[in-house]
Amino acid sequence: MKHKLTPFAVKVYKAVLTIPLGEVRTYKWVAGKAGHPRAARAVGMVLKNNPLPLVIPCHRVVKNGRRLGGYAFGPKLKQVLLELERDFRSEFSPIPKEKNDIIMEIF
């Protein structure tokens, strides 16, 4: 099933896919990677509507100062996911670029 995404949303999701397992980036960082450095709030709105939260790791995006920020499944689960990833990141590697491209074809 294909989802209708804006070009900005596609850029946001691609930027989020580059965040390594067990690491976090800010909404501002994602906005910059998406080519719109002043659009941090818009990034939050895009991530709020993430159609594939288990594939596109929006839980890795936090507010400035490393405060958690929002998450569709609640802040407790966001914190748990981040802690699990930090604990196990040595056993996993980030999604290779070619798999990112396959994932983005879904949209």
Image: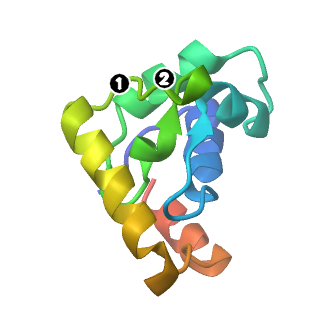
In the drawing, does residue 64 fall left or right of residue 70? right
Mark 2 and mark 1 lie on one chain; the one further toward the N terminus is 2
Residue 44: assigned label: 2
How far from the left and from the top, in percent, is residue 10?
58, 43
Q: Tell me where residue 30 sits by quadrant.
A: top right
Q: Residue at x 32, y 62 (%)?
A: 84
Scheme of image coloration: rainbow
CB under 8 Å between callouts 2 and 1? yes
Tell me if mark 1 has few (under 14), some (14-19) or many (20+) residues whose alpha carbon lies within 10 angstroms of its own: some
Q: Nearer the viewer's eye, disc 2 or disc 1?
A: 1
How far from the left and from the top, in percent, is residue 65?
59, 23
In which quadrant of the rendered image does the N terminus lie?
Answer: bottom left
Q: Report the number of discs.
A: 2
Real-space Cα distance between discs 2 and 1?
8 Å
Mark 1: which secondary structure?
Answer: loop
Q: Nearer the viewer, residue 69 or 83?
A: 83
Residue 5: assigned label: none
Q: Is residue 89 above or below residue 25?
A: below
Give, as a three-letter code, the residue at label 2.
Answer: Gly
Q: Nearer the viewer, residue 105 or 20?
A: 20
How far from the left and from the top, in percent, is residue 66?
54, 30
The residue tagged 1 is 70
Q: Residue furthest front?
A: 87
